[in-house]
Image (cartoon, rainbow, N blue to C red):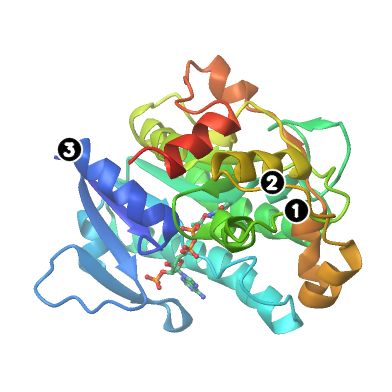
Amino acid sequence: METVLITGGTGLIGKHLSRKLKEKGYNVLLLSRNSSRGNSNSVYSWNPGKNEVENEAIQRADYIIHLAGAGMGDRRWTKKRKQLIIDSRVKTCELLFDKVQESGIKLKAFISASGTGFYGAETSERIFSETDPPSPDFTGEVCRRWEQSADRFQESNIRTVKIRTGIVLTRNGGALGRMLPAVRLGIGSALGSGRQYIPWIHIDDLCNIYIRAIGDKTMTGAWNAVAPEHIINREFMSKLAKVLQKPFFFPAVPSFILKLLFGRMSEIILKGSRVSADKIISAGYKFEFPDLENALQNLFTKR
Ligand SMILES: NC(=O)c1ccc[n+]([C@@H]2O[C@H](COP(=O)([O-])OP(=O)(O)OC[C@H]3O[C@@H](n4cnc5c(N)ncnc54)[C@H](OP(=O)(O)O)[C@@H]3O)[C@@H](O)[C@H]2O)c1
């Protein structure tokens, strides 16, 4: 049985992914800052600030999936918060690299989360693909440095995959969890111009792509993990209201209100790029949820 060690595995994606990996027959270990391990021999602790990792976690790993990172949209982007967003991804990745080197294990692959924020937030009809350069804006800079730190594994001949993830749709939590209360109250509306694209992916498809990245030895480098259907914010909100059988007639929330509420972080709400799913489709991946309405119906109407 092969063992997958997941950093940040206690979060939104990690919880789903752990369950799916176990169903596929993998042994799953978590690396967490808050390990209240009890009798569990599958949750290990690390303290990235002190460069500490439980050695046994690394020793047992055949694969590492690096999901850890302070939430991009959880708090206002102060200087301190921005540094934490970068360090919690980049320094943790460097720490993992050092520990893997020290341990002498032969890791089969290193798979890191990244984001479609790599391409920046740009409302236009341009479609971004994996060969495009990183954007100079903050999300682009975070993803560039995050991926660069992951590339150290590839440089030492460990297969490395970077999953440029769009907004992940799940039943609870994440970005969708923040949109739901207003829509459920019947006051869902577009945000800002409503013309910004929302690169999205159903959690099941994202987990399938991670699982494929483990098993498919031909997968290396960057891969966009977004559904093929391109949707702008106004259409997204209207489909969400439709699936929840709620009205959608409110005026859009003006940009200035979102800027006042969220400061610079409002960029990730008010702007959004169009991102291509062609590479993963060309590699033979078949999306379970290629279109938004079915994805939302699966999450909210089928139990
Ligand atoms: N969800 C999305 O829509 C989305 C989209 C694009 C990219 N991503 C990326 O995918 C990764 C996982 O996303 P997610 O939605 O599952 O995130 P999440 O729910 O916020 O979970 C992230 C995990 O990272 C760990 N973490 C948080 N702050 C940390 C810090 N300062 N230092 C080290 N570890 C920290 C936590 O685990 P412990 O408390 O157990 O240590 C947490 O459970 C993230 O890096 C995220 O940026 C997510």
**Side of 280 relative to 77 (left or right):** left
Q: CA distance from mark 1 to mark 2?
A: 6 Å
Tell me if residue 282 comes above or below residue 15 in the rendering. above
- Using the image, tell me which numbered label, if any, was put on residue 189: 1
Q: Amino acid at mark 1?
A: Ser
Q: Which residue is mark 3?
A: 25
In percent of the image, x 83 and y 47: which residue is there? 194
**Side of 192 relative to 103 (left or right):** right
Earlier sequence position, callout 2 versus callout 3: 3
Q: Considering the numbered disc 2 on the image, is that residue within a helix, a strand or a loop?
A: helix
Q: Amino acid at mark 3?
A: Gly
Earlier sequence position, callout 1 versus callout 2: 1
Q: Are marks 1 and 3 in contact (CB under 8 Å)?
A: no
Please identify the quarter of the rendering in which residue 178 is found. bottom right
Q: Position of residue 224 (x, y in %)?
A: 60, 35
Q: Nearer the viewer, residue 126 or 234?
A: 234
**Side of 39 relative to 50 (left or right):** left
Tell me if residue 107 comes above or below residue 44 in the rendering. above
Q: Considering the numbered disc 3 on the image, is that residue within a helix, a strand or a loop?
A: loop
In percent of the image, x 23 and y 79: which residue is there? 36
Q: Which residue is mark 2?
A: 237
